[in-house]
Image: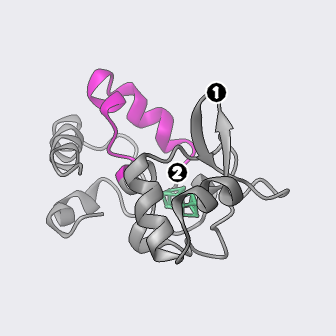
Amino acid sequence: MPSDLKDCKIVFECRQCGDCCKGYGGTYVTEQDIEAISRYIETEPQHFTAKYCNFSGTKPVLAQRKDGYCIFWDQLCTIHPVKPKMCRRWPFLKSVLVDTDNWQIMADSCPGIRSHAPEKLVEKCVREALSKDR
Ligand code: SF4
Ligand code: SF4
């Protein structure tokens, strides 16, 4: 979570349980994610995509191990400083602005999310997080 979103710890604080790093069909990676992670693990983007990604249609997603965990999970995220946008933004997603019920649904699968948090505060946090997107 970006440091300027500290107030949003009231509505979300990651417990580092790793539940979101397992299942769900994998994590999408953007071109910027691929470049950043490749630099971090000191490999070429092409090699990174071939070795660490699968494809969902035409979109690359991080590969998962046999146990269902993301290939970069090892008791914690091993690429934390450059983790994909999708991981960085969770749970402050556009879909929450479309329907705040999505916040409650997400809370069912993420112990870090405070369910029934004040709607206005949740929306404010989502807007702030989205405005920081690179
Ligand atoms: S499921 Fe929620 S609390 Fe657990 S690691 Fe993921 S974001 Fe953090
Ligand atoms: S990149 Fe890191 S935070 Fe994202 S799913 Fe993989 S292990 Fe979890």
* Frontmost residue, 117 versus 129: 129
| Three-letter code, disc 1 | Gly
Q: Earlier in the sequence, mark 1 or mark 2?
A: 1
Residue 40 visible at all: yes
Label ID, residue 43? none
Residue under label 1 = 57
Contact, mark 1 vs mark 2 (Cβ under 8 Å): no
Q: CA distance from mark 1 to mark 2?
A: 27 Å
- In the rendered image, the residue lying farthest to the top is 98
* Residue denoted by label 2: 110
Q: Tag 1: Cα neighbours inside 10 Å, few (<14), some, or many (≥20)?
A: few
SS of the residue at dot 2?
loop
Indicate the amino acid at tag 2. Answer: Cys
Span of residues in magenta = 89-109
Q: Main secondary structure of the magenta part?
A: helix
Across and down, in percent, residue 47 comes to 63, 61
